[in-house]
Image (spheres, rainbow, N blue to C red):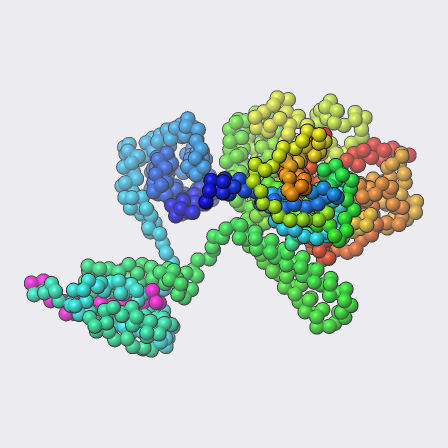
Amino acid sequence: MTNDDIEFAQNRLELISFRIGEQEYCVDIMAVREIRGWAAATPLPQSPPYVRGVINLRGAVLPIIDLANRLGFGVTEPDARHVIIVVRIGGRVVGLLVDAVSEILTTTADAIQPTPDVACDAVKRFVKGILAVEGRMISWIVLDQILPDQSLEEAA
Amino acid sequence: MDPMDAIKVTFFQECDEQLGELEAGLMALEEGTGDRETVNAVFRAVHSVKGGAGAFGFEDLVKFSHTFETVLDLMRSDKLAIEPDVLHVMLRASDVLADLVHAARDGGTVDQDRCAALMEELEHLALGDSAAPAPAPVAAVTSAPASPDAEPEPDEWGFVPLRISIDDVPLLDEPAAPASDEEIWKVTFTPRPALYAKGSDATILLRELAILGECDVAVDDSLVPSLDAMDVNASYLSWTCFLNSDKDEAAIREIFEFVEGDCDLIVERIVVSTPAPITAPMPVIEPIAPPPVAIVAPAPTAKPTAAPPRAAPAASKAAPAAAASGDGEGKAAANATIRVDLERVDRLIDLVGELVINQAMLAQRVAETGVVRSSNVAMGLDELEQLTRELQDSVMAIRAQPVKSVFQRMPRLVREIATATNKQVRLVMDGEGTEVDKTVIERLSDPITHMLRNAVDHGLETTQERIDAGKAAEGTIRLAALHRSGRIVIEVSDDGRGINRERVKAKAIEKGLIAADLNMTDEEIDNIIFLPGFSTASAISDISGRGVGMDVVKRSIQALGGRISINSNPGKGSTFTLSLPLTLAVLDGMVVSAAEQTLIAPLTTIIETLQPKPGEVRRLGPNRTVIAVRDAFVPLVDVGVALGFRKESAQPDSGVVLLVESEGGGRAALLVDDIQGQRQVVIKSLEANYQRVEGVAAATILGDGRVALILDVDGLIAQRVSETRAETQLAKAG
């Protein structure tokens, strides 16, 4: 094993990439619990538009976040082709509504470039870096702040 | 887990139990309901704590419990009278002991001054009141006077012999003990000198044999010569074993496989009818090697009459050993309770919850296929439903616990507040055995603590005021728990001054909490104390906090799906009544629909349902409506609008109205589109994966697998009601 290999193993990062409209995004595979088809969600009152509601995942009540809307796109009108990526954020399990899941990427932390300064606030808040793969641009989303910030909302 | 840590965990669990016993015992003595046995129990509790603490090297704990024990011992031997003053010191000492235990467990520190002060008081008791001229505290313990009853005495290491029930172990003098006509193995084992020469040990073989089942071993020493004639290389002993095991002969012979040629072994199946196999006088056990298990150890003199009492404890050891070997025959079943990880129980409850949902889903799917109700499938499903229900009830019962675990912490709290406020308080507790789900129990502690604090601090007058008012100098606070119509009710009542309504109202107006010209009933005024930011205490006290008291209590109770109400009688006292569901896992709900959403309204909040007639619903101002219910106007809340599912209110006379009661007893009406039925639903938290949502108490999963929201009726109407109240009063007047 060469030094490069060792370094690669240490920095190794596995990501799941998915599409929102024409753009590609990805999240750390370690956070992903499962991927499932879209099921109608029960809307929640007094919630931001990007919270689609809650679904039943084998007895647990799971909030569904419309990731496109969270990133500043319009509200998604989900149909049977849409996909929910079930992720764990802290102690919570949350579903992310996306257009389609594409592939699993293996890369290293070094390969991730910083987000360019042109991005709007919503994007800068969630996109922690950009990955170039075979001429495609894939934005790496960090999930910590995906859920509504309760403390802020309570203060408001 | 490290085995030592596991033992420590058990020790602290037991400590908590002992501390509870200790306090309960001392209080019983204080009330005069205790007897000799109570004193013994109290002594035992402290003694066990000391014993365990010594084993783990908790020096402070040992030192304190030792002094405490010394005083208790004096009491036990009648050298110290059971007097209120003494008991007061002891009760406070029990508080310090609890602190020390918790400090030892959590690694915290204790108030050294307080600890030292009480040590001194205890030592004073030990010296001052002792009949014997100043026996050193230590001497009092080591001399350990025999108590009148057969209480096991601690040995010099501080361990008390534990009584073990041996009811189901056959005793030698109990001929009926073994079932008659049992087939058992008789193994006669006579080692030859070669066996010992090769380094084998008869004891080990016998121990192996005992693992196969219940085993009684008798040694035959008739061949042992006198000492001068003894050959060190010879073998004089042989053993006869009566083995009650379902293993076959091969399994028994297997044990002796390695010594096959070096011993005489006879294995035979014999039928024993009553009496027990070992009725013959017991021969002497081999003195050099008493095997630790299942070998009946008779008196060395082979006097048959002396054998049974000695044999009993030894035989009782056989039971756990057999059970531990995995071949136990239920001998360990003597234990009535087991300790189970709460996590496992919770997992079980979750699973059963999912089963209930699945069962409902299945039933709905089958019904959709148009199966006739009398068909086998439908009937089978009905039975399944019943079984599921029963299973759920049984599982919930596992987690039900008496409220005692919360109540027993309260006397100490009251004592401390009483001391801090310089009041004399007596706490009377009732219904400690009332059972409620563990999840509820955990959340009872804070509200009760708060209410008791309030009762002592605000409810009771000072001693002087009480005397002036012609009351007993000692105030009484009653803490009671009872079951009422499927809920648990906790009452905290005091015989203090009651709520001063004038003052409360003035204060509320001054703080801008209510309008000055508002016409309020007594009940409404009493409920002001639940408003956030209200506090009548002119000076901020350490005890009841900074006016965060009762509104916090109310909110935490509401979060549990409970209600709190107050009943005050000026000059005579107040009663806070808290009513909570017995479980937080299931709820009886009414399934309703509003704006195409299916929602659940908790059944307990609904007083009645009605179909509004045209003209009963009146508009008030631009966007308020009220409904006339038997000549009273009740604010009407459109659930669909309140939750933001639709903008425009529905036509009221096309929907159904749920008349609900809110916390303060005020009524409100909820407008929904339709009622679908009633059912028990499993409560699923929204906060677990998301966050709290205004107007929604929790969620549940319906028969079709979809999530439905459970309405937080109070949260939904609270805001609207307060906004509408003034307008309603106008309507009444007009």
**Vertically, is B688 above or below B532?**
below
Residue stretch rendered in magenta on the structure: B211-228
Q: Residue furthest right?
A: B615
Residue at the location (19% across, 59% down)? Answer: B288
Residue at the location (62% across, 26% down)? Answer: B546
**Vertically, is B657 above or below B468?**
below
Left or right of residue B440, residue B506 in this image: right
Residue at the location (78% across, 68% down)? Answer: B370
Q: Can residue B647 be seen from the camera position used here?
A: yes
- The quadrant in which residue A52 appears is top right
Residue at the location (60% across, 28% down)? Answer: B545
User: Which quarter of the image is occupied by the C terminus of chain B?
Assistant: top right
* Front residue of B69 and A69: A69
Q: Can residue B631 be seen from the camera position used here?
A: no
- The quadrant in which residue B77 appears is top left
**Vertically, is B109 above or below B25?**
above
